[in-house]
Image (tube, rainbow, N blue to C red):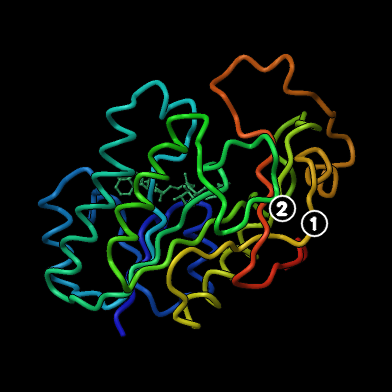
């Protein structure tokens, strides 16, 4: 099996290098999602039989500021990648990494059957790409929510923004297990505990200060991103 992992230079991509050591992980220079010719040439040369597609524009503010770039990368890029992959391998197993940010975030505890209703453009592009991918029967949409393992990088963290967070390493472990089980449809790879970002941050930085979203002025954020799963099993934040 020839496995392609996109977004190899990203936070999750680095973690996936450990759980998919056999995979190809092209740089953006080798495979640019916004360039159809680049995608076609890469796929024709490497002919993957499975793809774990993590590459995306992930910055919520940048997605709002340049909606065209967000759509071209996250939606068109996914569509072109899938199309080219199926042209060389019609049974290609396509795993799309999506986010809890496809949900509204008012109730939390979203399962695989819950109805997406994104509050920002990033979430909208991720949801649209999910729909593109799901037209292919040999596909799996994995929704997850993770933070980079290591010391919390900011002086503050929201005490009223919640999720069932994993570290990047735990998400990469779950993605590999779902991949190996050949799961299709939607699967949530999530933590077993609903925590605020402040609670997560405090585990690696005891001096981090709590802030609330009340004073936040940026694009709308998903306030309660907690996921549950009815199709898989949750993971521990320690994973
Ligand atoms: N972070 C989270 O909390 C979270 C939660 C749930 C789901 N996700 C999803 O998980 C995936 C990975 O997230 P992440 O946090 O690891 O992202 P990240 O650190 O921002 O990395 C994004 C990756 O996408 C690549 N990329 C961006 N535009 C590209 C293009 N035009 N062509 C090719 N590659 C391109 C980047 O390459 P360069 O290095 O060249 O820029 C980088 O490797 C995303 O699909 C995201 O939506 C993230």
Q: Residue furthest right?
A: 206
* Screen quadrant of the C terminus: bottom right
Q: In the drawing, does residue 64 fall left or right of residue 168?
A: left
Q: Position of residue 205 (x, y in %)?
A: 83, 42
Query: Looking at the image, can residue 157 be seen?
Result: no
Q: Position of residue 39 (x, y in %)?
A: 17, 56
Q: Residues within 10 Å of mark 2 (few under 14, many from 20)?
A: many
Answer with the quarter of the image where residue 73 lies. Answer: top left
> Which residue is disc 1 drawn over?
193
Q: In the drawing, does residue 39 fall left or right of residue 171?
A: left
Q: Position of residue 85 (x, y in %)?
A: 20, 67
Q: 141 or 84, which lies in front?
A: 141
Q: In the drawing, does residue 30 fall left or right of residue 180?
A: left
Q: 194 or 174, which lies in front?
A: 194
Q: Residues within 10 Å of mark 1 (few under 14, many from 20)?
A: some
Which of the marked residues, 1 or 2, is nearer the chain's N terminus?
A: 2
* Residue visible at 52% across and 30% down in the picture: 119
> Which residue is disc 2 drawn over?
164
Q: 190 or 172, which lies in front?
A: 190
- Identify the element where label 1 is drawn: loop
* Residue visible at 77% across and 29% down in the picture: 156
* Residue visible at 38% across and 52% down in the picture: 130
Q: Residue furthest bottom?
A: 1
* Screen quadrant of the N terminus: bottom left
């Amino acid at each position: 099996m020839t496995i392609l992992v996109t977004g190899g230079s990203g936070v999750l991509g680095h973690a996936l290098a450990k759980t998919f050591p056999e995979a190809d992980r092209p740089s953006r220079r080798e495979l640019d999602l916004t360039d159809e010719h680049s995608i076609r040439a890469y796929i024709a040369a490497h002919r993957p039989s499975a793809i774990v597609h993590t590459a995306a524009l992930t910055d919520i503010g940048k997605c709002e500021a340049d909606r065209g770039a967000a759509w071209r990368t996250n939606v068109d890029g996914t569509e072109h990648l899938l199309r080219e992959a199926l042209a060389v391998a019609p049974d290609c197993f396509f795993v799309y990494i999506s986010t809890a940010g496809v949900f509204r975030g008012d109730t939390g505890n979203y399962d695989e059957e819950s109805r997406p209703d994104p509050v920002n453009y990033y979430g909208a592009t991720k949801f649209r790409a999910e729909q593109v991918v799901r037209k292919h029967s040999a596909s799996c949409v994995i929704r997850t929510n993770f933070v980079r393992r290591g010391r919390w990088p900011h002086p503050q963290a929201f005490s009223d923004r919640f999720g069932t967070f994993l570290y990047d390493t735990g998400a990469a472990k779950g993605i590999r297990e779902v991949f190996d089980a050949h799961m299709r449809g939607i699967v949530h790879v999530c933590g077993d505990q609903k925590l605020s970002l402040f609670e997560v941050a405090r585990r690696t930085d005891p001096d981090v200060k709590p802030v609330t979203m009340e004073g936040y002025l940026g694009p709308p954020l998903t306030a309660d991103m907690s996921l549950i799963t009815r199709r898989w099993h949750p993971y521990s934040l320690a994973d």
